[in-house]
Image: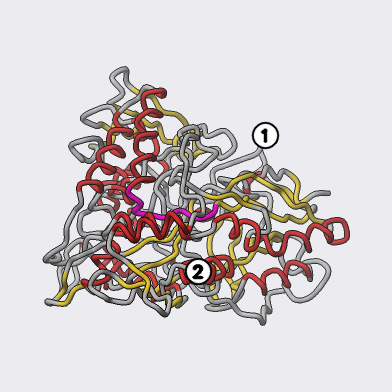
């Protein structure tokens, strides 16, 4: 779904020795299961606190509605229907009858009200969803109240185009979690902040989705089984999902995952550009199909830390480097200095295209007039010269104070594509006389730098995307994913010296304006202006948009591959072929 974007920093630690019937064999030992892989252990089993993608919650929880990734249309989930008032300020959802949690307790409007009012909207519970519920210019949150036994009423103070997206958030069980939200720890924080970590016994986690977690062995696997109290049925009245068991193998690298898939231990694989040719030759023998969903939703980009704040008197970024990073000529020179076409051809093997915008190419809001920054080292050098940079006799780039231009670039270790992109950036910028110290980091360490310490210089990241460009977590200046000039977490003291730049405020204002207009052509016009300002100011230097490729065993019927949802977005309906 398009809302809310989550960090797509997918380097995960994986184990080679998989002992869950996924070994080197021509077919899975258990034919009644779906075996997939992820790259690292999950960080939490708490849906509200999650900041990673993928996560388990698409299997274990549902919201009131969901988005069909093929059509972009909102469809009923826990709510059987909804009505929007004529002034577009009220949505009334009607909950399905006889819904149950996995522990057998009734799922009622109290669970919905608790999830929104006491979790997502609780200022003491930082989460990636809260900012996305802010409405319009005022930034006010919706009022959410119950009406009768089955209706939930969302009321806002002004029309807001992405309003319906807010009904996609996972609903959590009040009868289990309310005490943890109400009770505070000695520091005054809700105990909820530490509940349902990955050390929680799976049987204690109560869900409403198609599957429930039944086993987790760190660095090895997660096992999900069909939730017998899931509400959905097929046209014949048969309880869904059809596939009774799902395995997530934790594999230490994409190379290992490829070996597992080729040996028959995995049922599906995200196909990387480097493995496409090999797998294409094996489609028939391996009895699988490679699906191409076109340009993937989301983004890959290089960004600099523009934060000029200090903590305990120490600058987050060396002031010399902060001056470079905050120089628009410098950022534009970097953009012209990276050869994206070479990335497409060498790293993505032609299975991608240069990326120019935070809005996905497949979105109706994508601005096709964007020019981007085609590789032009001569223009890059001219921009650097305008800001006083020059080359010394050794070919090293120096600033006008004679400081050598050198910075550290991070990405998430284990992601081969991003590691290759970082290596090429290092090489390309070296041709401009810039020394880049490329240092991939463990996922957890990287996230801590971006979210907590805020001490980093440059990074290659990715963010998920969707059809609707509304992404306040990224573009509002106080957004939780506003990484290039991140404000401290809620409850932390402000950073002396931190600045919000005029161009930054302009982008935020356009992002806000696009959400306030219901007329589609006018929305597109505003989002075109938004994309053009992002292209000019370069908070993110966009790199390459890969094609969405997925290989799936032919023993699964009902696959409707989508760049937005992948192969198993409709997992509940997919069946094992006869």
- The residue located at (37%, 68%) in the rendering is 458
540 vs 569, left or right, is left
Specify whether residue 492 is in view.
yes
Image-quadrant location for residue 14 = bottom right
Judged from this view, the residue extending furthest toward the bottom is 17
Task: From the viewer's side, name the closer residue of 162 and 507.
Answer: 507
In x, y percent, where is residue 62? 47, 47
Image-quadrant location for residue 132 = top left
Judged from this view, the residue extending furthest toward the front is 393
Query: Which residue in the protein does label 2 denote?
Result: 422
Task: From the viewer's side, name the closer residue of 415 and 553.
Answer: 415
Q: Secondary structure at mark 1?
A: loop
In x, y percent, where is residue 227? 56, 55
Please say if 511 is above or below 26.
above
Judged from this view, the residue extending furthest toward the right is 285
Within 10 Å of disc 1 (Cα), the crowding (few <14, some 14-19, many 20+) is: few
Please say if 137 is above or below 471.
above
In the image, the segment drawn in magenta is 537-544
- The residue located at (43%, 40%) in the rendering is 64
In x, y percent, where is residue 326? 26, 60
Please say if 475 is above or below 366.
below
**Which disc number belongs to residue 76?**
none
User: How is the rendered protein coloured?
Assistant: secondary structure
Mark closest to the chain's N terminus, 2 or 1: 1
Query: Which residue in the protein does label 1 denote?
Result: 235
Magenta highlight on residue 57: no
Foreground mark, 2 or 1, reads 2
Specify whether residue 441 is in view.
no
């Amino acid at each position: 779904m398009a809302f809310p974007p989550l960090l797509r920093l997918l380097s995960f630690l994986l184990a080679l020795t998989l002992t869950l019937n996924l070994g080197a064999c021509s077919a899975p030992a258990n034919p009644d299961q779906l075996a997939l892989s992820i790259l690292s252990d999950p960080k939490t089993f708490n849906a509200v606190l999650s900041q990673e993608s993928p996560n388990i919650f698409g299997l274990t929880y549902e919201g009131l509605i969901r988005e069909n990734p093929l059509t972009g249309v909102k469809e009923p989930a826990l709510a059987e229907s909804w009505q929007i008032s004529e002034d577009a300020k009220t949505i009334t959802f009607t909950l399905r009858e006889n819904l149950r949690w996995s522990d057998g307790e009734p799922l009622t409007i109290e669970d919905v009200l608790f999830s929104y009012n006491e979790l997502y909207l609780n200022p003491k519970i930082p989460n990636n969803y809260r900012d996305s519920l802010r409405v319009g210019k005022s930034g006010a949150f919706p009022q959410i109240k119950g009406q009768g036994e089955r209706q939930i009423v969302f009321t806002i103070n002004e029309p807001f185009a992405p309003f319906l997206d807010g009904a996609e958030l996972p609903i959590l069980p009040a009868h289990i979690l309310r005490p943890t939200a109400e009770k505070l720890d000695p520091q005054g924080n809700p105990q909820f902040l530490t509940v349902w970590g990955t050390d929680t016994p799976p049987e204690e986690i109560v869900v409403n989705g198609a599957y429930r977690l039944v086993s987790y062995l760190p660095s090895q696997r997660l096992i999900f089984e069909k939730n017998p109290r899931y509400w959905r049925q097929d046209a014949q009245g048969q309880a869904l999902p059809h596939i009774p068991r799902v395995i997530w193998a934790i594999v230490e690298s994409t190379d290992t995952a490829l070996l597992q898939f080729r040996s028959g231990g995995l049922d599906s694989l995200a196909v990387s550009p480097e493995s496409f040719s090999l797998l294409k030759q094996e489609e028939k023998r391996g009895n699988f199909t490679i699906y191409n969903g076109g340009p993937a939703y989301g983004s890959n980009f290089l960004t600099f830390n523009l934060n000029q704040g200090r903590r305990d008197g120490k600058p987050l970024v060396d002031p010399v480097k902060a001056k470079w990073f905050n120089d628009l000529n410098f950022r534009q020179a970097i953009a012209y200095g990276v050869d994206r076409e070479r990335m497409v051809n060498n790293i993505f093997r032609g299975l991608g295209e240069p990326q120019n915008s935070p809005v996905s190419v497949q979105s109706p809001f994508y601005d096709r007039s964007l020019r981007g920054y085609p590789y032009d080292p001569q223009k890059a050098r001219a921009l650097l010269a305008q800001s006083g940079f020059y080359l010394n006799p050794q070919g090293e780039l120096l600033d006008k104070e004679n400081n050598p231009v050198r910075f550290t670039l991070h990405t998430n270790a284990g992601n081969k594509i991003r590691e290759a992109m970082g290596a090429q950036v290092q090489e390309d910028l070296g041709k401009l006389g810039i020394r880049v110290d490329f240092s991939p980091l463990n996922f957890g360490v990287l996230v801590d730098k971006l979210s907590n310490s805020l001490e980093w210089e440059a990074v290659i990241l990715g963010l998920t995307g969707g059809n609707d460009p509304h992404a306040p977590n990224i573009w509002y200046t106080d957004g939780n994913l506003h990484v290039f000039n991140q404000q401290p977490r809620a409850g932390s003291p402000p950073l002396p010296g931190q600045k919000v730049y005029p161009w930054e405020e302009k982008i935020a204002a356009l992002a806000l304006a696009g959400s306030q207009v219901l007329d589609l052509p006018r929305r597109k016009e505003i989002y075109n202006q938004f994309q053009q300002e992002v292209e000019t100011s370069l908070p993110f230097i966009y790199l390459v948009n890969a094609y969405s490729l997925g290989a799936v065993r032919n023993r699964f019927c009902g696959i409707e591959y989508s760049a937005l949802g992948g192969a198993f977005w409709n997992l509940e309906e997919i069946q094992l072929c006869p």
